[in-house]
Image: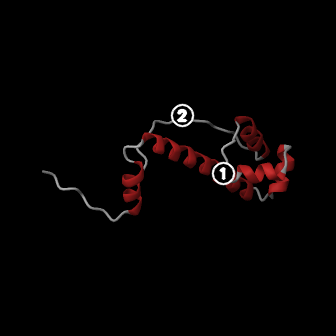
Amino acid sequence: MTKKRSTTDVIEILHHRFYEGHPERLAALEVERANAEIARTIYRLRTKARLSQRELAELVGTSTSVISRLEDADYEGHSLTMLRRIAKALNRRLEVRFLPLTTAK
């Protein structure tokens, strides 16, 4: 008989309790992580360029509220077209990659 390993790592505990054995929950978690990463990246690049949301919106040809939504981790409407426009305005190249699935903890 194998003894269950005990842990105090809260992330590991939460993963085990809520995600392990629930592929639909893991898939939803990955979507949320991707949305949050896109939002953080847009914010980071905009602030690094010392642009306000209004200034970036003008460069992209959109409204301030659109930039605000794109920088919101809960926003799910990212389009490649808009991301390309933002990349161009920030003098960047957009890269989309398909990576192997990993077990998220």
Q: Which mark is residue 39?
A: 1
Question: Residue 78: percent from the left, percent from the top?
Answer: 69, 41
CB atoms of marks 2 and 1 within 8 Å: no
| Direction left: furthest residue | 1
Question: Residue 29: percent from the left, percent from the top?
Answer: 51, 47
Residue 92, image quadrant: top right
Amino acid under disc 2: Phe
Q: Residue at x 57, y 48 (%)?
A: 32
Count up the numbered dots.
2
Mark 2 vs mark 1: which is more N-terminal? Answer: 1
**Which color mode does the image show?**
secondary structure
Residue 55 shown left or right of residue 26 in the figure: right
Amino acid under disc 1: Ala
Q: Is residue 34 above or below residue 80?
A: below
As helix, strand or loop, the secondary structure at mark 2 comes to loop
The residue under label 2 is 98
As helix, strand or loop, the secondary structure at mark 1 comes to helix
Question: Residue 89: percent from the left, percent from the top?
Answer: 79, 45
Tell which of 68 and 90 is nearer to you: 68
Q: CA distance from mark 2 to mark 1?
A: 19 Å
Question: Residue 4: percent from the left, percent from the top?
Answer: 22, 56
Residue 9 shown left or right of residue 30 in the figure: left
